[in-house]
């Protein structure tokens, strides 16, 4: 699971059309894919940002297309 570097899910949604700010967490290789759906969360105790949330982000060519 990726860690999204946004204060809230609302802030993540406001960044549709931009590149994703994230942190890798896997010890077994990168999870980030430039096309497709990514599952992630914000973990305030790790990032120091805002509140905890979980989201599925759809990317096309490294650009955020949707957040749910």
Image: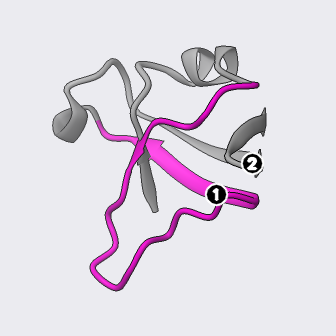
Percent x, y of residue 63: 72, 39
- Whether the magenta-drawn stretch holds residue 23 is answered as yes
Q: Quarter of the image for the C terminus: give it.
A: top right
Question: Would you call the spot at circle 2 few (<14 residues within 10 Å), some (14-19), or many (20 or more)?
Answer: many
Residue drawn at the location 75% of the way across and 59% of the way down: 35
Q: Is residue 31 left or right of residue 47?
A: right
Pointer 1 with pointer 2, Cβ within 8 A: yes
Q: Is residue 2 left or right of residue 23?
A: right
Asked if one can make out residue 67 in the rendered structure from this viewpoint, the answer is: no
Is 68 rendered above or below residue 37?
A: above
Of helix, strand and loop, which mostly describes the magenta segment? loop
* Viewer-proximal residue among 67 and 51: 67
Camera-near label (1 vs 2) is: 2
Percent x, y of residue 9: 57, 25
Label 2 element class: strand
| Residue identifier under label 2 | 59
Question: First in sequence: mark 1 or mark 2?
Answer: 1
The image quarter in which residue 47 lies: top left
Residue drawn at the location 59% of the way across and 24% of the way down: 12
Residue drawn at the location 76% of the way across and 50% of the way down: 61
Query: Which dot marks residue 38?
Result: 1
Q: Which residues are magenta?
A: 17-43
Q: Is residue 50 left or right of residue 16?
A: left
Percent x, y of residue 17: 75, 25
Percent x, y of residue 21: 46, 36
> As drawn, which residue projects farthest toward the front?
61
């Amino acid at each position: 699971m990726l860690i999204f570097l946004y204060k809230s899910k609302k802030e993540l949604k406001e960044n549709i059309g931009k590149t994703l700010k994230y942190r890798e967490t896997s010890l077994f290789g990168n999870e980030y894919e430039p096309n497709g759906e990514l599952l992630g969360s914000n973990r305030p105790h790790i990032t120091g940002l805002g509140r905890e949330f979980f989201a599925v982000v759809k990317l096309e060519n490294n650009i955020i297309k949707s957040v749910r």
